Amino acid sequence: MNAAAGAALVWCPFGTVEDARAAIAAVLDEGLAACANILPGVESHYVWQGAREQAGEVGVLFKTNCERLGNLVARLDALHPYDQPSILGWRCDVASEATLVWLGGLGE
């Protein structure tokens, strides 16, 4: 892989930091992401099954490349302890050349 693969990001909240760390370890070990940033103390407000809800969560921002984006989203869906986790992935329009090279080799 190379810088031409392009950068991609995935946002995924978890219920606990332990669940987030377990998912991060798995996708890093499997080569699906090069990095993940844990953002603790996320306060989530949402509508679920017709009711307004609020919960404390741990947000995670995963950094990957475009070639692995779909596989990363699918793997997080399989690993996640929620029945229907919110997982959003997107391709980045712009990234530094060094970041593109790093993501192209997924942390090598």
Image (spheres, rainbow, N blue to C red):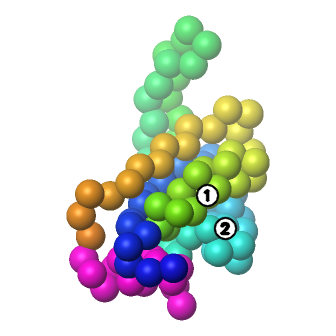
Q: Are marks 2 and 1 in contact (CB under 8 Å)?
A: yes
Q: Is residue 82 above or below residue 40?
A: above
Residue labelled with disc 2: 27
Is residue 14 found left or right of 46 in the rendered image? right
Is residue 20 found left or right of 103 in the rendered image? right
State the SS at label 1.
helix
Neighbour tally class for label 1: few under 14, some 14-19, many 20 plus, Cα within 10 Å: many
Numbered range of the magenta stretch: 96-108
The kind of residue on which mark 2 rests is Val
State the SS at label 2.
helix
Neighbour tally class for label 2: few under 14, some 14-19, many 20 plus, Cα within 10 Å: many
Any part of residue 42 in sight: yes
Residue 104, percent from left and from top:
46, 78
Residue 7, percent from left and from top:
39, 66
Any part of residue 18 in sight: no
The kind of residue on which mark 1 rests is Leu
Can you tell which quarter of the image residue 33 is in?
A: bottom right
